[in-house]
Amino acid sequence: MVVCRAMPILPPEGHDDRGRVLVIGSLNADLVMQAPRLPRAGETVLGASFRVVAGGKGANQAVAAARLGARVAMIGRVGDDAFGALVRGELTHAGVDIVYVRVDPESPTGTAQIVVDIDGQNAIVVASGANARLDVRDVMHAAAAWEEAVVVVLQLEIPLVTTAATIAAAAGRGLPIVLNLAPVQPVPADLLRAVTWLVLNEIEAEQLTGQPVRSVTEAGSAAAAIRHPGQRVVVTLGSAGAVLVHDGTPLHFAAPSVHAVDTTAAGDAFVGALAAGLQRRLSDADAVRLAIVAGSLACTKLGAIPSLPTAAEVEAHGVA
């Protein structure tokens, strides 16, 4: 196991003409409660605060990439409601192109109920809403977005048939594909084989492989078991960093030490930053370094999109 601790390489400032990160995925309103601890089944716990913020894995990853300087376009669906307006506004404010975020008059915006304890750990329940109606036509009709795409990012909070069609389209164009295998679910092997980067956390790796993933070594073994030829697999390990397996020896990337307030969007910050690094043509290792720092910093603030770091914040706190 090789340990990597170098400073991430940030993109140069100024105009970026290297194409777009194209994110296809979920958009939610997150209903966030803070509580002294997560409730057990059947238990009521008095919370300390409540807020509504924009979220959804697709939206989070799009904003995460945009805040690090990438040009980003988003394909997705929201409802014709206040939550949908909130999410679209947050994406626009972050500089994400929302031309292909469709307003669905027949379904509400997706929502996530999130409880966060004093240690920053969380429990989440998602109601998909309009995300469940994102279909293949929504993706294929986004012609301008595809023309400028240089990396495609997906998760599993939209229908699997839509994800499959998107992966096939991206592979047919020779585009690198980042698939965040979350929430984990059975995915056909031929679909996974077409993915360039597969990103999952230790729990998802355990669920996918049936193997325990409680250490860096076990994460490397799980990633190697999952990986198809030519593919890069990253298993994130929270405060223990992440492990990348491509060809040869697994690489372990340490995470910077931070005070965790809320881990809700840490994985999404990682994926968005990884995509931004790929859009900037960083090496695999440097893209993962950038992603590790962004994911760690996302734990230091409450909420999903509000916690996603800027390039300046990553640069100021980027020593792993």
Image: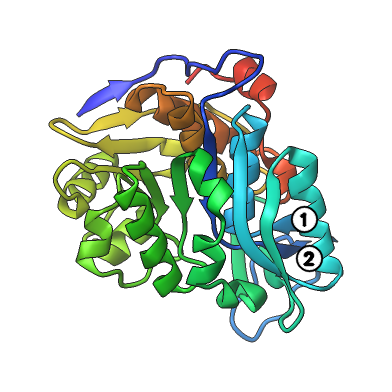
Q: Is residue 262 left or right of residue 289?
A: right
Q: Is residue 97 left or right of residue 153?
A: right
Res 243 seen here: yes
Residue at the image position 15 percent from the left and 33 percent from the top: 247
What is the C-alpha distance between the residues marked 1 and 2?
6 Å
Q: Which residue is mark 1?
A: 88
> Closest to the observer: 202 or 79?
79
Query: Are the residues tagged 1 and 2 within 8 Å (C-beta)?
Result: yes
Residue 297: x percent and y percent? Answer: 61, 33
The amino acid at mark 1 is: Arg
SS class of the residue under badge 2? helix
The amino acid at mark 2 is: Gly
Q: Residues within 10 Å of mark 1 (few under 14, many from 20)?
A: many
Residue 42 higher or lower than 2, as above or below:
below
SS class of the residue under badge 1? helix
Res 158 seen here: no
Residue 287 higher or lower than 266, as above or below:
above
Residue 131: x percent and y percent? Answer: 60, 71
Residue at the image position 22 percent from the left and 42 percent from the top: 220
Q: Quadrant of residue 197?
A: top left
Quarter of the image with the N terminus is top left
Q: Is residue 8 left or right of residue 204?
A: right
> Closest to the observer: 118 or 313?
313
Residue at the image position 61 percent from the left and 73 percent from the top: 125
> Closest to the observer: 88 or 3?
88
Q: Which residue is mark 2?
A: 84
Residue 64 higher or lower than 79, as above or below:
above
Residue at the image position 57 percent from the left and 71 percent from the top: 134
